[in-house]
Image (cartoon, helix red, strand yellow):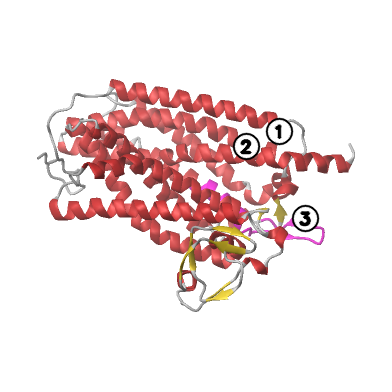
Amino acid sequence: MNPLDLLADAAENLYPARMQMALSLGWHIVFACFGIAFPLITVFTEWQGYKRGDAALTELAHTWAKAMGVLFAAGAVSGTLLSFEMGILWPGLMDRFGEVFGFPFVLEGFAFFIEAIFVGVYLFGWNRLSPKAHMLSALPMILSGPAGAFFVVAANAWMNNPTGFRLDEQGRVTDAQPWAAMFGPSTWPQVTHMLLAAYMVTGFTIASVYAVGMLRGRRDRRHRLGLLIPLTFAAVLTPVQIGVGDWIANTVADNQPAKLAAMEGQYETTAGAPLSVGGLYYDDELHYALEIPNGLSLLIHHDPDGVVLGLEEFPVDQRPPVNVVHLAFDTMVGLGSALLLLAGWFGWTWWRKRRIPRTAWFLRAVAVSGVAAIVAMEAGWVTTEVGRQPWIVYGILRTADAVSPAPGLYLGFYAVVVIYVLLTGLTVFVLRRLAGSADTPAPQEVDAEPPEPGGGEVAVR
């Protein structure tokens, strides 16, 4: 085939390849969050039930374990699709750099198989193992989920800040060092940010399910504990996530200044740069934005007069799509701030009165917090991935040069859409059946105290 024909095919394939990858990653990451965080929350609840001799807590953990198994199975399907898509859609990336950053994917495969094995042991071990043996069997599952996330996010962090290799005069990779590549400057900030996001998504989403039930009149102890336990996990970690956000913003400023400029819609290099909220970017300027004077310089440099590079420093063909990145970043920050307020509301009331807020508005806020946490996480990944464009390996390999020239990628995209629609419908159906089978009548109990590691009875008022 004529090389020019291959280039033309690759150009046509860029859009469907991007859309397929975005759909697959966006769908899978939600289920990956439950794979990371749900096991620990479930086993913690089982431990509290065993420690207190509380059948309600044990029953709650058993129900969550079954839901965890369903979500793990759905995530396994989407994760398998993603592993094929990396090679099929982006051969230019894998052929050239696979020896550098492919190692974490190998390790992630081991983590996945360990998690899959012990998810099975944990699920089928109920009433077959002693309580202590059953909870101990969950430890590999609890550890392998975050380990798998570490390896995958480390590979993504490498794409943002490629290290661990050299290029010869022809641009070929030499002196590949996979271990060094896995621990680049973005690895720990991104991994920490992702793990905390997983606990926030899982905690707020589980709590939101029970908040909806409570708004419908189900004020039994099981619903109260079903809200309080995951909400406590999420609420405690939310302010930590805000601090980690500052860490990762500074990492982006040091290593990807074009991304930072797009996140803030900052065109001119400025000392004492303002922090911009909202607005649309056009004509090399951000319009209709709320600006906090010197806010960006203070955030990035901890100096109100610090210099922040603008988009003008970078060629036009090396700038990310500013509006997408800026609005996604604002969405993430805005929803994260709202969740922080919700966590503060819950924490303040609990500290003062040892109960959750009584108002229905609190339950309404918790009911939408799961969706808010998911949208915030997705917006964060849009900021990370779209903000890296036009590079698939930052500063070295363009996304357009890595895409497959093979025909038929549009058909693959349509097939993936169908698969995910069916998989979503099936997952929701199974979870609803599971929820219906575990439902209980609504007694008249009003307040419950969440179990604490220090012991003591669960108080019901």
Q: In this figure, which residue is indicated by the disc labeled 3?
A: 172
Residue drawn 57% across the image and 37% down it: 23
Q: Name the mark on residue 20.
A: 2
Q: Secondary structure at mark 1?
A: helix
Observer-nearest of 272 and 83: 272
**Quarter of the figure with the C terminus:** top left
* Picture quadrant where residue 337 is located: bottom left
Q: First in sequence, mark 1 or 2: give its number.
A: 2
> Percent x, y for residue 321?
63, 54
Amino acid under disc 1: Leu
Amino acid under disc 2: Gln
Q: Secondary structure at mark 2?
A: helix
Q: First in sequence, mark 1 or 3: give its number.
A: 3
* Region of the chain picked out in magenta, as a range: 150-176
Observer-nearest of 310 and 426: 310
Of circles 1 and 3, which is in front? 1
